Image (cartoon, rainbow, N blue to C red):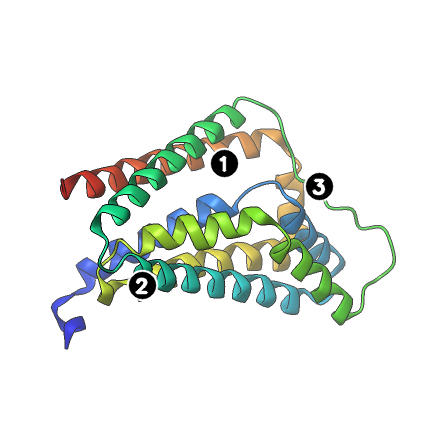
Amino acid sequence: MTTSIYSLPHMFPVFLQGLTLSLGLIVAIGAQNAFVLRQGLRREHVGSVVLFCALADALLIGAGVLGMAQALGDRPGLARALALAGAAFLLMYGWRALQRARQSSQLRASQGGDGLSRVAALAQAAAFTLFNPHVYLDTVLLVGSIGAQQAAALRGWFVAGASSASLFWFASLGFGARWLAPWFARPRAWQVLDGLIGVTMLVLAALLLCHALAGL
């Protein structure tokens, strides 16, 4: 079997690359994260909202990787071009994260308002997730094109790593809201987090650039 030629030392770096890339993209101040944090603070349908957001990300990431892999199958030139474009995007993203690290920002989630039914909560989670054009840029195009660069037998590990990042992040926000909310309200915490994200994105960009140039 083709998977037998890959041992754990091959699989773990691919899993870790998917995890760090997805985590770097998803950890941001935005409407979806604020909504999950709000539901966690209210202890209202937390499991359903967390599961929906994590599954939506996993499906989009999987579709992106598989779709990109199929589209790039016999097009090494296009694969290299997308890898270079992805590296450029990560460089820009990393630079912007480092710039944000120099500014003050915070994530707040209001606990006011009437409670939501499970259907209404899931509808809002779907809107925040699926009606945001950036989610398709991040999961389908960027993560998909980078995941498609992996060997066929390792793409599943990349998808698993990227999907695990989403599940970890949303579960932390939802179930740890009462402990995390004060931390997220501190601008200094976000400055440190953005600094770490910026460095991570720059490292991933360098690795992707090396991978793209290796085929020249």
**How many marks on residues?**
3
* Image quarter hosting the N terminus: bottom left
10 Å crowding of disc 1: few (<14), some (14-19), many (20+): some
Which residue is denoted by mark 1 in the rendering?
193
Report the amino acid beneath label 2: Gln
- Using residue 159 as the reference point, say whether residue 31 is left or right of it: right
Secondary structure at badge 1 equals helix
Q: Which mark is residue 108?
A: 3
In the picture as drawn, the residue positioned furthest to the top comes out as 102
Vertical order, 147 against 5 (above or below): above
Q: Is residue 35 left or right of residue 1?
A: right
Residue at the spot 72% in from the left edge and 58% down from the top edge: 39
Residue topped by disc 2: 70
Residue 92 rendering spot, x and y as whole percentages: 42, 30
State yes or no: discs 3 and 1 in contact (Cβ < 8 Å).
no
Neighbour class for label 3 at 10 Å: few (<14), some, many (≥20)? some
Q: Residue at x 43, y 51 (%)?
A: 141
Name the kind of residue labelled 3 in the image. Answer: Arg
The tag earlier along the polypeptide, 3 or 1, is 3
Within-10-Å neighbours for mark 2: few <14, some 14–19, many 20+ = few
Nearer-N-terminus badge (1/2): 2
**Residue at image x 39%, y 37%?**
90
Q: CA distance from mark 3 to mark 2?
A: 41 Å
User: Does residue 148 appear left or right of residue 108 in this picture?
Assistant: left
Q: Earlier in the sequence, mark 3 or mark 2?
A: 2
SS of the residue under disc 3: loop
- Residue drawn at x 45%, y 44% is 24
Task: Give the Cα distance between marks 3 and 1.
Answer: 16 Å
